[in-house]
Amino acid sequence: MFKKILIANRGEIALRVIWACRELGIRTVAIHSDVDRDSLHVRFADEDICIGPANNADSYLNVTAVLSAAEITGADAIHPGYGFLAENAHFAEVCAECGITFIGPSPDTIRRMGDKAEARRTMRLANVPVVPGSEGLIENLDEAAEMAAAIGYPVIVKASAGGGGRGMRVVNGAEELDDAVETASSEAAAAFGSGAVYLEKYIVRPRHIEFQVLGDRQGHCVHLFERECSIQRRHQKILEEAPSVALDAELRAEMGAAAVRAAEVVNYEGAGTIEFLLDEDRSFYFMEMNTRIQVEHPVTENITGIDLIKEQIRIAAGEPISFAQEDLRILGHSIEVRITAEDPWTFVPCPGKIDIFHPPGGPGIRVDTAAYAGYTVLPHYDSMIGKLIARAPSRPEAISRIKRGVDLFVIEGISSNLALLQEILDDPDFVNGDLSTAFMEEFLERRRQRLRGEAAPR
């Protein structure tokens, strides 16, 4: 087992890794930018080291600075968390060259799954359903027009590298295609350093269902059931829950088996997520693989009783997965909401100092956060303040608990999205489990019409 792990991240995920390491008896090193000196991950790590100024490129994304910190402090492993360098194949390679274990999959796996076009080809080899689309990248606009006509509108243009909604455009007709391809390509080049894009059939009202997977060096691979992630805005998730009301035992088994095949075909090691689109006719299609721990991993921990961060660490140390597929059961229901420092209706980030911070408690409530009264939410990083997670024996009870948590969460001094979350949790479509990736668009339109005194179409 490792003696010391450097955490190449900040905020709540850095704290989450620290707690897991403490339980495993492993010392921790926190890295931080010069504006993050007062962060809780710095306070609670065994050691800390400043690696640069606020700008990500000069600190948390600076491979040389991160590796230097690991070598100076004698860390024998690095946990990347999510975001930043977590899915950077070059970083994983450099870790290996320096004799430091990267807690995650191999550089080859990261590279193959990070290239969306290559990932699609790989999934076909594993007999995992993929959304109908182009076999490769778009070379020119004429080729794009031919592909779109063959696939059938609507189509979606997607960046081959990256994600998070950047470099993506929905195209409803041929007259929109040229502009969509050029815009998506330019946006992808600016965000990811590559303007490569491809085409897929756009499924109009799918659910976003993802399966948590684990793989080890001994060749074992398991799934830990699904998470429903359909409530999102501009491809950024707002609420996640497990299990999904859309899956029965038969479909869960079929999708879980496909997720395991997807992980096995790339010899996956560590924690990862296979993301699917689930159509209204129960057809499902591979969308992408995230080769890291997810923000929403707590809901899976809640319904399985498995500590995913500790499993990541054990697997990276060469140990086998500590359970078998047949050992797993779904234990109740769990819902997570992301608490962000932003205007609840314009979604504009609202950084600043938190004057009062009182997270909720009580039965079935978990709060993962690095915020506190007096903490300043910085403009340099993601606006997420923390995650509120509820667990209960049933979905209705979990909804009741998450609503209680949101109602009792006190954040003063800055704007937060708590008011938005309250309305989502009261929305009849959410309560009834009538979800799709169009949920937020339809929810906001219903709200606008309600405020104008109009009857919203259902």
Image (cartoon, grey):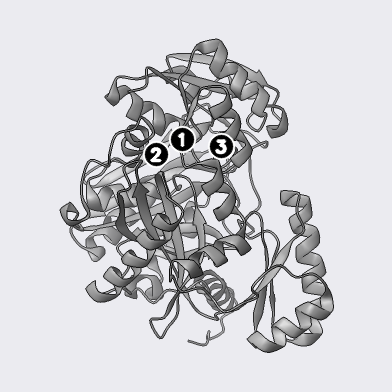
- Residue 239, position in %: x, y? 43, 58
Res. 192 visible in picture: yes
Evaluate if marks 2 and 1 touch, with contact meaning CB atoms under 8 Å apart: yes
240 up-or-down from 359: above or below: below
Name which residue type carries label 1.
Glu
- Tag 3 secondary structure: loop
Q: Which residue type carries mark 2? A: Asp
Could you give the CA–CA distance between mark 3 and mark 2, rounded to whole angstroms? 20 Å
Classify residue 152 as left or right of residue 107: right
Please rate how many residues cluster around mark 1, counting C-alpha atoms within 10 Å: few if below 14, some from 14 to 19, many from 20.
Answer: many
Residue picked out by circle 3: 413
Does dot 2 land on a helix, a strand or a loop? strand
Cα distance, mark 2 to mark 1?
A: 6 Å
Residue carrying label 2: 368
Q: Is residue 422 above or below residue 352?
A: below
CA–CA distance in space, label 3 to label 1: 20 Å
Eye-nearest disc, 3 or 1: 1
Give 438 or 193, whichever is nearer the viewer. Answer: 193
Q: Which residue is mark 1?
A: 12
Drawn side of residue 457 relative to residue 244, left or right = right
Residue 237 sits above or below residue 13 on the image? below
Q: Residues within 10 Å of mark 2 (few under 14, many from 20)?
A: some
Q: Position of residue 295 (x, y in %)?
A: 45, 47
Q: Residues within 10 Å of mark 3 (few under 14, many from 20)?
A: some
Q: Earlier in the sequence, mark 3 or mark 1?
A: 1
Residue drawn where x is 40% and y is 75% of the image = 429
At label 3, which amino acid type do we have? Gly
N-terminal of the pair, mark 3 or mark 2, is 2
Disc 2 or 1, which lies upstream in sequence? 1
